[in-house]
Image (cartoon, helix red, strand yellow):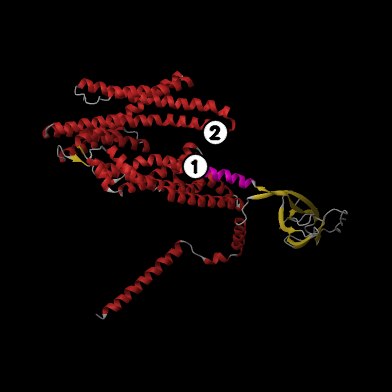
């Protein structure tokens, strides 16, 4: 028993020694050296910077200048120095001594300048370069007297010049050019963050539902259905994107006018509505014949085609109408440009939307066929079907992964990037089909959940400052690159926050809606969405606040906004201008924090 206190003392001593070693190594690694803080040069520079930072360049006056010059010899010449006589009523300078050596202290006296004026005393060599050697402030009579040190210059026989420049304000104060640029850039920063938050929120909301564990855990499907869906999705994406590309090329070749685009954008929804009304089964009836089902399937394919056509017409309408509006709107021409950009963005995303719609249609149809086969066929036939479909699905998935890797690493060897991955995927599919029960369901929802969360974690781990470097290469230096970088990071961040909020909802409403036989979309709409709207709004406001602050940082990498301007001013050591930008950032961040807090209290 007597040993324990001694052991505790030894352990405590070792812990103290370990802590000291850790912090000693930390000091060594971080180059801690307090002696540098007492350096006279560093203290002088620090003082200059701090004084500049507390004098932001916000207001200025119109100024007028009064210039007075006198010769000075450096060093003293052999001959007597000629004495210059002041002109009555004119200001003049008196230098004592009138000649001196380099680095010598002289006395400069000004007489008859503007009263209460300030300015520099400059040394002007024959080259014309100006070097400030002192600052002065005149008294009520317009006189001043200062001491200044001459610079280290080569001796010259000819006289050099001392020039005093008196400056005084004219008129009232007004915003300086630095303040004008800062206001423009801080507004750019706020709207850059707004666009990034909007883009990120639109994409994060649907992703959050498939990244929520409580919604995906119960999603299970037979292996047959999963395998056919995995084959159907890539096929549908390819068909939808190809159809969108073909329709777009036809319309571009036809050079659709504004009137044609407007007519197409108005008539396409009517055609879709009529096709949907015909294809949907009438109340009390159900199509059982294959002919009717095939006809309805073809009509639904036609509806998808009409929808793609509608998107193209709408994009062309935006491009044509926006260009037509820019000139007549004059100063409001940015509205026309906004319509143009909306049309152009719609044209870009139409193939993506068409691919997703095609993938959902073909993948969903293939999945339903697999579900029906698993429900109707016996276990033995389903075992064989699973072997085939799982092998094909594995080959498709692995070959797609191989093609992606080939694009990144440029292997350019089909055997290594296509055939070998396809064979490996088929083998994996066969093994899964052999191990799985023929009619057993697989946790496809959990798999999608983990894949989605992994992708979100990977995106979120990359800082926007890094992302913006890539987008600057793509779209150029400016706020557009910053908005894209912040938007991508916002998708990952908000999707995580939103999904965690979905996971924490009350299970009662969810179970009640599911008990009525509601499908997944109805369950989300009526049981999940009402519970998550308030926290979604709160997170959205908070993310906008974060994006405003982050947009000042990505400007250092070319992402536009006030950060780009701040970096330039710091680079040229213009700390008064940098102080103006930092003040603007602080005001905007504080205002955003106040507004978001007020809105959360009122609406959340």
Residue at (48% x, 32% y) in the render: 341
Residue 179 picture location, percent across and down: 61, 47
Look at mark 1 in the image and give the residue it sits on. 192
The N terminus lies in quadrant: bottom left
Q: Distance of mark 2 from mark 1, alpha carbons? A: 16 Å
Residue 373: mark: none
The chief SS type of the magenta part is: helix
Q: Which region of the structure is painted magenta?
A: 177-192
User: In the picture provided, is 90 more to the left or to the right than 328?
Assistant: right
Residue count near mark 1 (Cα–Cα under 10 Å), binned few <14, some 14–19, many ≥20 = many
Is 176 magenta? The answer is no
Q: Are marks 2 and 1 in contact (CB under 8 Å)?
A: no
The first of marks 2 and 1 along the sequence is 1
Look at mark 2 in the image and give the residue it sits on. 334
Is 184 magenta? The answer is yes
Residue 259 in view:
yes
Residue 192 picture location, percent across and down: 49, 42
Residue 548 picture location, percent across and down: 49, 47
Decide which of 84, 8 is in the foreground and name it: 8
157 over 245 or under it: above or below: below
Residue at (32% x, 22% y) in the render: 275
Residue 558 in view:
no
Residue 207 picture location, percent across and down: 34, 41
Number of marks in the image?
2
């Amino acid at each position: 028993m007597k040993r324990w206190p001694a052991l505790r003392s030894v352990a405590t001593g070792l812990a103290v020694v370990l802590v000291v070693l850790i912090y000693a190594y930390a000091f060594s690694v971080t180059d801690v050296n307090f002696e540098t803080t007492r350096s006279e040069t560093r203290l002088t520079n620090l003082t200059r910077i701090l004084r500049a930072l507390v004098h932001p360049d916000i207001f200025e006056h119109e100024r007028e200048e009064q210039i007075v010059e006198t010769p000075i010899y450096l060093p003293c010449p052999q001959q007597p120095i000629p004495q210059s006589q002041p002109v009555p009523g004119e200001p003049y300078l008196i230098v004592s001594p009138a000649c001196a050596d380099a680095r010598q202290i002289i006395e400069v006296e000004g007489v008859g300048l503007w009263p209460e004026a300030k300015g520099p005393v400059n040394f002007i060599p024959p080259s014309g370069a100006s070097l400030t050697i002192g600052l002065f402030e005149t008294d009520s009579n317009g006189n001043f007297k200062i001491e200044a040190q001459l610079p280290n210059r080569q001796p010259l026989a000819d006289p050099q010049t001392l020039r005093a420049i008196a400056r005084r304000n004219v008129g009232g104060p007004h915003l300086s050019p630095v303040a004008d640029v800062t206001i423009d850039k801080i507004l750019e920063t706020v709207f850059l963050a707004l666009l990034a938050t909007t883009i990120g929120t639109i994409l994060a909301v649907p992703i959050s539902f498939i990244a929520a564990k409580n919604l995906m855990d119960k999603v299970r499907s037979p292996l047959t259905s999963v395998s056919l869906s995995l084959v159907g999705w890539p096929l549908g994406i390819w068909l939808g994107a190809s159809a969108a590309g073909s329709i777009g090329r036809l319309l571009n070749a036809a050079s659709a006018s504004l009137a044609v685009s407007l007519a197409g954008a108005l008539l396409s929804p009517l055609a879709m509505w009529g096709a949907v009304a015909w294809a949907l089964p009438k109340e009390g009836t159900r199509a059982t014949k294959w002919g009717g089902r095939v006809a309805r399937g073809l009509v639904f394919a036609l509806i998808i085609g009409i929808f793609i056509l509608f998107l193209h017409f709408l994009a062309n309408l935006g491009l044509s109408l926006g260009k037509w509006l820019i000139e007549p709107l004059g100063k409001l021409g940015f509205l026309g440009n906004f319509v143009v950009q909306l049309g152009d963005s719609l044209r870009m995303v139409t193939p993506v939307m068409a691919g997703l719609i095609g993938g959902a249609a073909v993948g969903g149809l293939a999945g339903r066929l697999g579900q029906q086969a698993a429900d109707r066929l016996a276990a033995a036939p389903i075992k064989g079907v699973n072997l085939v479909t799982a092998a094909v699905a594995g080959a498709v998935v692995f070959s797609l992964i191989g093609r992606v890797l080939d694009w990144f690493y440029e292997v350019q060897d089909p055997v290594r990037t296509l055939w070998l991955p396809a064979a490996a995927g088929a083998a994996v599919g066969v093994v899964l089909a052999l191990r799985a029960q023929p009619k057993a369901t697989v946790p496809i929802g959990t798999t999608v959940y983990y894949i989605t969360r992994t992708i979100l974690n990977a995106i979120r781990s990359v800082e926007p400052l890094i992302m913006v470097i890539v987008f600057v290469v793509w779209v150029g230096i400016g706020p557009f690159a910053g908005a894209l970088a912040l938007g991508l990071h916002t998708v990952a961040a908000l999707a995580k926050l939103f999904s965690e909020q979905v996971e924490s909802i009350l299970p009662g409403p969810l179970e009640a809606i599911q008990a009525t036989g509601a499908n997944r979309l109805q369950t989300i709409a009526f049981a999940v969405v009402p519970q998550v709207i308030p926290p979604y709004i709160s997170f959205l406001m908070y993310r906008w606040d974060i994006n405003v602050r982050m947009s000042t940082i990505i400007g250092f990498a070319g992402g536009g906004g006030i950060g780009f301007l701040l970096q330039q001013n710091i680079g040229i050591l213009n700390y008064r201008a940098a102080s103006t930008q930092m003040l603007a950032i602080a005001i905007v961040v504080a205002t955003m924090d106040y507004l978001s807090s007020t809105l959360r209290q009122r609406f959340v």
